[in-house]
Image (cartoon, coloured by chain):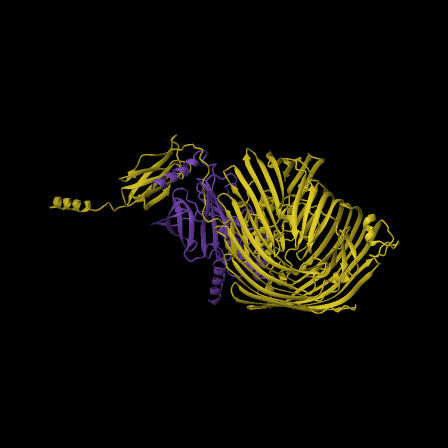
Chain colours: A purple, B yellow
Amino acid sequence: MLAKQLTTLAILLLLANVEVDAQVMRATYLIESTTTLSEYHNGKGELYFNAGKSLFIHASWPGASGYDSSEGKYRRVIGDKEGMPVFTDRKSNIQVYKSIYLAQKKTPWIFEDTIPRINWSITNNEKVISGHSVLHATGAYGDRIYDAWYSPEIPVPFGPYRLGGLPGLILEAKSRDGVVNFEFAGFTANVTEHPDLKAPVEGTHVSQDGFKDWVIKHLLRIEATSTSEYQSTIGSCDTDYTIEKDRWPYIYEYKKERAEAGNK
Amino acid sequence: MSQRFFIFLVLILSWYPLSAQSTIKGRVLDVNESAVGYATVSLSTPDFKRILAYTSSDEQGVFILSTDTLPAWLIVSYLGRRPDTSKVNVAGEIDPIILTAEGTNLPDIVVLGAQEAMTQRDDTTTYDLSDFRDSTDNRLEDVLRRLPGIEVDDTGSIKVHGKPIHRITIEGSDLFGRDYQKASRNFRAKDIGTVEAIDHFEDNPVLKSVNNSEAVVLNLKLEEDVKSVLGGNLIVGAGYGENIKHHNNATLFKVTSAHKSMVIANADNVASGLNLGRTGQNQGYTGKRDLSVPALTPFYLIQPPSVDYIGLPSYYTDSGNAGSVNLNHESEISSTWKVNLRYNLIGSKNTQLVMSKTETIDNAVEYELTNTSDWETVNKESTSQIKFSYLSESKKASVEILSTLGTSSADWNSNFKNPEYGVSSVNDLKGNLEMYRVLYSQEYGPGFVGQVGLSHETNVENVFTSYGSEELAGFFSVNQSNSIVQRIDLAKKATSLDYTFLHQVKRWSLGLRLDVGNRNVFAKQLKPDNENTWLFEGIEAGFTYRYWRQTINAGYSLKENVDIKGSLAVGRKYPDSEVDVPAHSAGNIGIELKKKDGGRLRFSVFKNRSSIDDERALYGFEYLNSPFNVFVPGEVPSTTTTRGIVFFAEMQNTLKLRNTQLSSSYVETLNDDFMATSFLGNISLLHLKYGQTSRRASVNIRHSMFSGITKSDVSFRAAGSLASTNYLLNDDFFKLKVLNSEIELKGSARLSNKIRLKYATVAKAQFLLDNDANFTRWQNRLSSFATVANGQIHGELIQMATLQNGSVSNNLVVEVGADRRVSLGNKEIYFRFKIYNLFDTDIFSIESTYDFYTFSRETTSTGRFFLLTADYSL
């Protein structure tokens, strides 16, 4: 108990000699997922944060678009120099993030939502991760149940990707279906070189409603190129395309509605 | 009644804790009574084991919590402030919580969990260089040496998974071909973000479905801030020692998704190591088809002298002027076409004075060749290569068209003196290479690929040597002329056509290849006009032959990550001459197991039966390799059979950053002939015969590890071998048995926050069994770096000693220097001042041994000198 308090004191004291808002910290994660985009999500993730803002970056995401011929495979890559970031601002209650689903002209989409409210249940379990005492919580996000371990010694409601809302920094989070795993890989209390804690700018800003409209119109444009011999369409998005399950159901829902309307 | 009931109700209820939701409201302020927004507020059970509720304060610092359990502890915390813990007994509004901040100079705390410095995914091991490099690592090669599982030798050749790498690529593109040291020695460590070691590398998309490549490649991924901008660095330096010193270098690169360029220009007389040396020297992995690698090898009949480094860093013995320009470029000129350009231009002028002694004993007779050679060489070489690549939109067809032109020349003068007489020589060597290749690849269907290749190549060398010595001429001359002139013209031509069929279905892979070709080899030794020697009879020799060769490769996956592979090749040559050249055959079979963590096990057996090297059959004339060394032709030998077993195991732990490799082999080479030497006074005559019967068993262990906390690394290697070789010396037959052992320990360690140490120690011992002869060599290199404000102070001590049959030679050199970093806007310049050979050692000596010869060499040093350089990074 005493050791825990002293550790907490040490961490907080060393942070106290600079302006709080200027001081940026970094938590590093090892991302392992089996989603369709795991090739780009997986690898190192870095969360930069201060008391009010956070920026999560996929450090392994390719920076440039083009063709990737590594690992004996060859595929088209939509790169993002900003590392497919997730920006969270507590004051404005917004979270800005990117997606490459149906991205055009090699640039990702930029979305802005309110910070997701995850209904966490904090349990009695605790353990130690690299000298940090962490507490256990479970919660649902993106249609997956997560087991998260957070550190009350780092009192910010942030975590990897879009996870957060606990009374401490999430150091580890795993989905119970085994698809998503964020493993703690390091923490630096005073980062001297870091990206600006601000919303991403490289991409195409779009609202959720606007994107849904665009997807349907894009589908219809593609289907309009069909001939008597060849049917053009866009397939439904894979349910595990990204970390949030069934993130992009627009085409599936539209086709279902269309089929039902056709049967009537 | 109601009063009694009421009292009863109160008594009953008093047994139970309050179960209704209680609301606690408060406000968080700082010492100045300003609101602290977004502070974390939580309620915990008195034993702190359970969080009852939590929230954040709003912008006004206000928070509201609801709980059904009181009393409880209220914990309010905020980054950079001392947390407040207080007990709450009743619900309602509590006094404001004041959070204080206290300044302190505590260092950053780095809490380490599972480091992702090194990861393994399928066939790729990825290293995050930011986790490995430190301020003392300048070039990429400095960091590569420290990566677990990667081995870099003194020449810069790299091995991964126990195999020589095929290439270093930049963002997936091959700019440098076999000369990958241009990347590893010229890229700055800070410009590279990650290094991927990719096994089974195949860069032709048409072959993806039938990928059976065993090549390993290092792929460099640049840091984001140097992508798509002009990157690199400029070095300007000057100094003084025995003469004026200079060092100038420009390394510029720009890498975008469509265009990749790197230009390296260097001029110095301090043997900086950035001068590129001869192109195509790096052999690398030879199992993968490579259009840029010539099929014809240089003749190496007579070679210009090269600087003898005595095992020390080159700048201690090499003060020659050297300059080079190297251009490597790749562009996507359309969605289907790509062009690669490479151009090298190298020039150097070197001189050296070497005192050497060669000794051997035959039947109690001691032969000793002692001479002093003082030589000067001017080398020039240029190579240009252009390759067009086409890949169809469907990725099912590709064409590669390559053209290479190269010229080289070397002019050297040397003076030899031995105790009896002196010889001066003038030499000239010129070479030309032309190569044209086309390769067409087509996927017929999933798992079916065919390739057709066409190649034409010519290689021409002209050698002129003139030795002036009355005494030497007396050995060979009938006219007592005081000079010997030899002129030899050599030429090779090769034309070939090949067809390859590759098929992959389920667990099977199959490859069939048929090569047919025509080769012409020609040599002409000009008869001197004055007929002043019986040695040179003016021979013209050459032959042309046709050949075919068929190769079958097959592979089977027993299960995931367990592969059995084998190959069989047979071929025959059909010469036009009377020389009967028997069939060639080669076969091997092996099994490989791979684990997901990168560990692997490889076992293979092989047997090759081949006829003589083409050119050797030509050497039917005597020629002088040097004034004291004559090659005498021998009989054309029969076939050589080589067979052996190779074992390799690797264990890797990406979490703990460790790698262990164990390899062993036994190889037999069976040939009826012997390496033969005889002596004619002080001149050795090497009877040129092909091959020897030899047997060699070896074991090699290597362990490397890296600590992410201190960025320290250590690698340990131990090797041993026992070899048996047949020799013929003056008609006496020898079976020479040699036991070799080697131990190497190197790495770097952080002694404190500001002091780092780098070390390398190598000990080699060689014992001639059934003989008293032994030889030991021990080399140490110790470097220390102390970080001071905006710079470093460094010192280096290099020591090399040899011990041979009780005779010791020892060399010790010391370097000291200081660096200073100066900011120029958002750029930096590193100024470096360094003194080399601090104690001005003027002579270096070394003993070495080769079979039953011992060699002693002494060479003059470049002397003490200083150098001041400015290194500007773009």
List the single residue furthest toward the left: B1
Q: Residue furthest right?
A: B530
Residue B695 lies, in percent from the top left, at 62, 61
Classify B124 as above or below B569: above
Image quadrant where residue B415 sits: top right
Q: Quadrant of the C terminus of chain B?
A: top right
What is the count of numbered marks? 0
The spot of residue B859 in percent (x, y) is 69, 42
On the rendered structure, is B391 left or right of B523?
left
Residue A212 point in image, percent of width and height: 50, 54
Front residue (pair A159, B325): B325
Front-lying residue, A21 or B850: B850
- Asked whether B805 or A262 is in front, the reply is B805
Measured as percent of width and height from the top left, residue A232 is found at 57, 63
Which residue is outermost to the front? B364
Left or right relative to B506: residue A117: left
Residue A78 seen by the camera: no
Vertical arrangement, residue A114 with respect to residue B166, above or below: above
Identify which residue, B624 or B348, lies in the foreground: B624
Would residue B715 be found to the left or right of residue A138 on screen? right
Q: Is residue B226 visible?
A: yes
- Position of B137 relative to A143 (above/below): above
